[in-house]
Image (spheres, rainbow, N blue to C red):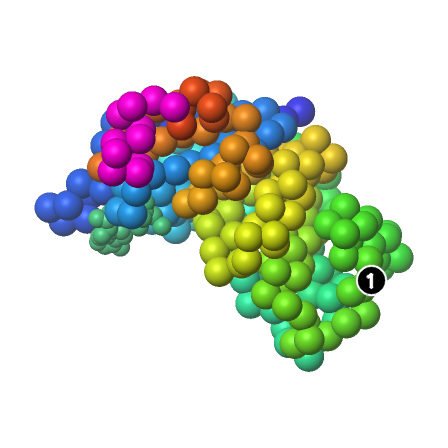
Amino acid sequence: MSAVLEVSSLGMRFGGLVALQGVDVTLEGEQVIGLIGPNGAGKSTLLNALSGFTPPTEGTVRLDGRETTRFTPQQYTSAGLVRSFQTAQLLEDETVVSNLLLGRQRFSHAGPVRQIFGWPPHLKSERAWLDQAYAALDLLGLLEFADARASSLSTATRRLVEIGRVLLAEPRIVFLDEPAAGLDAASREHLAEVLRSLPGRVGCLIVLVEHDVNIVRRACDRCIALSAGSVLADGPTDEVLARPDVRVAYFGE
Ligand code: ADP
Ligand code: MG
């Protein structure tokens, strides 16, 4: 069953600053949902609120119908919601495979939350984990790097390894905050194609914060545009990107 994250009237205040207000969205399906908006629109704040890093000051969040508004990051992770930056640092002296295997750490916090969300205890053999790591490398086109040290990788390959590590957590929902930042055009396009293929192949929902509209067009069928802490538009990517109000907010047109 694919995950459903329902966000109702969500708000976030930092002292007098209103970073998010009245956000109503339902994130669901095995797809990549783009989250766009100008700098300061509240994209990272929304991801932080929906992953327990900074609980919202208003509104409610439900995962699969259960309220999770006050969940801690560990509780969200145990429930299958994984953020890329949690594992952003690679172990430089370790191989790519070893770095991927670190992703299974979330199963070490087995506990009541996972039971609530219906996960059986993970008693996988080392061999099974290794097979899973190689399957993830195959999906990401990284098999040739399996035994390479992390320190020898290009920036673009590192980003893919970071995503591979997220996949080892068997996520239901993945939040990626600008994973293509700093990559050249060809690597960005490759990353977009890889991201587009993942939800159907591993059965997850990806929420992608991304500045580059070409990446959003390539990777996302649905797109949510934030402006000044509120949802300006939410729908099929082409329609959202064509809207005059989105173009004004996002491109200053
Ligand atoms: P985006 O990721 O869309 O560029 P952010 O979510 O980082 O935007 O920021 C939205 C607004 O919230 C900005 O005005 C930012 O300065 C403010 N903000 C974000 N985090 C904090 C914080 N921890 N304390 C105070 N203000 C914050
Ligand atoms: Mg941001």
Looking at the image, which residue sits at the far right? 127
Q: Secondary structure beneath disc 1?
A: helix
Q: Can you say which quadrant of the picture contains the C terminus?
A: top left
Q: Where residue 102 sits in the image (x, y, percent)?
A: 67, 62
Residue type pointed to by label 1? Glu
Residue drawn at x 55%, y 26% as measured from the top left: 221
Crowd rating for badge 1 (residues with CA inside 10 Å; few <14, some 14–19, many 20+): few
Task: Give the vertical position of 96 relative to 74 (above or below).
Answer: below
Which residue is at the front of the view, 154 or 45? 154
Horizontal side of 243 relative to 34 (left or right) equals: left
Task: Give the vertical position of 110 relative to 230 (above or below).
Answer: below
**Is residue 58 among what the camera can see?**
no
Looking at the image, which residue sits at the far bottom? 93
Q: Where residue 203 sits in the image (x, y, percent)?
A: 69, 33
Residue 244 on the magenta span: yes
**Is residue 135 among what the camera can see?**
yes
Q: Where residue 218 sits in the image (x, y, percent)?
A: 57, 35
Task: Write down the quadrant of residue 240 in the picture.
Answer: top left
Horizontal side of 58 relative to 137 (left or right) equals: left
Q: Can you say which quadrant of the picture contains the N terminus?
A: top right
Horizontal side of 182 relative to 109 (left or right) equals: left
State the predominant SS element of the stretch in magenta.
helix
Task: Write down the quadrant of residue 219 in the picture.
Answer: top right
Looking at the image, which residue sits at the far left? 16
Residue drawn at x 74%, y 35% as measured from the top left: 201
Residue 66 on the magenta span: no
Task: Write down the quadrant of residue 142 in the picture.
Answer: bottom right
Q: Which residue is mark 1?
A: 144
* Boundaries of the magenta span: 242-253
